Image (spheres, helix red, strand yellow):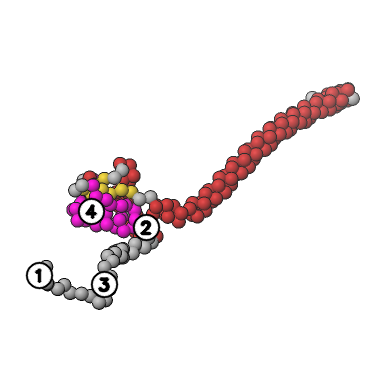
Amino acid sequence: MTGRRFPTYDDAVDVTPTTAGPRARPSSAPSPPPPSEDEIFAALASPVRREVLRLLRERGPRSVQELASGFAMARPSFSEHLRVLREAGLVSERRDGRRRLYSLEPVPLVRVRDWLDPYERFWRDRLSALRHLLDDTETADNDTDGTKTVDAGTSDTGTSDTGTSDTGTSDTETTGGTTTDTATASAGVPPYGSGGGHHADHDEERP
């Protein structure tokens, strides 16, 4: 023992190990609002962007290089088209190693379909009404053609009867003329122009 004195503590010291509470996580950035219909339709207004969507629909996810190879334009200009499609929610981007792959997103297209659906029903109803109108018109034309055919047959029959009547009248006139000449001869009257009267005068002048 060296006689060295250790310090004493009158107050009790709490030596219970303290546990740190959970670390506060940094607040995540708020998710951007969904694209508006104006943004979606504006993105679809470009034929280049519509062609990009068609390629993604038919061929699946594609890299920027694969998509840009089908367009005769500078890479910055094509990247701008991809940015518009991303902001409209029509495509999504993900990393695949050193490549960036783009995929088609169907949700905005469903919104486009929902927006167009009332107009589709409107035109479908109009086309259905037009189809019924054309069918009714065709049926009426067929009925009219049948009526004209029946009338034409009746007119031909009437003309034939009239011709028979005219023929009968002509025969009657001829027969009538023949009957008159026969009756005159029976009464002893010579026909006109026969000269019977002149012979009688010569007989009276003879001594």
- The reply, left or right, for residue 113 in relation to residue 105 is right
**Residue displayed at 22% across by 45% down:** 66
* Category of crowding for the residue at label 3, using alpha-carbon neighbours closer than 10 angstroms: few (below 14), some (14–19), many (at least 20): few
Which of the two discs, 4 and 1, labels the residue nearer the N terminus?
Answer: 1
> CB under 8 Å between callouts 4 and 1?
no
Q: Residue at 84%, 27% (x, y): give it.
A: 180
From what the image shows, is residue 19 above or below residue 74?
below
Q: Which mark is nearer the camera, 3 or 2?
A: 3
Q: In the rendered structure, are the residues bearing label 2 and label 1 in contact, judged by CB atoms less than 8 Å apart? A: no
In the rendered image, which quarter contains the C terminus? top right
Secondary-structure class at tag 4: helix
Estimate the spatial distance between the alpha carbons at disc 2 and disc 4, rounded to whole Å: 19 Å
Whole-number angstrom distance, CA of label 3 to CA of label 2: 71 Å
Q: Nearer the viewer, residue 96 or 198?
A: 96
Is the residue under label 1 in contact with that under label 3 (CB below 8 Å)? no
Disc with the residue nearer the chain's start (4 vs 3): 3
Is tag 2's residue or tag 1's residue first in the polypeptide sequence? 1
- Across and down, in percent, residue 40 comes to 36, 57
Task: State the extent of the magenta-drawn residues as a range.
Answer: 70-96
Residue at disc 3, secondary structure: loop
Q: Secondary structure at mark 1?
A: loop
Tell me, for residue 96, which label it has, or none. none
Q: Tell me residue 62's x, y (percent).
A: 26, 45
Say if residue 195 shows up in the picture.
no
The residue drawn where x is 27% and y is 54% is: 82
Q: Are marks 4 and 3 in contact (CB under 8 Å)?
A: no
The residue that disc 3 covers is 13
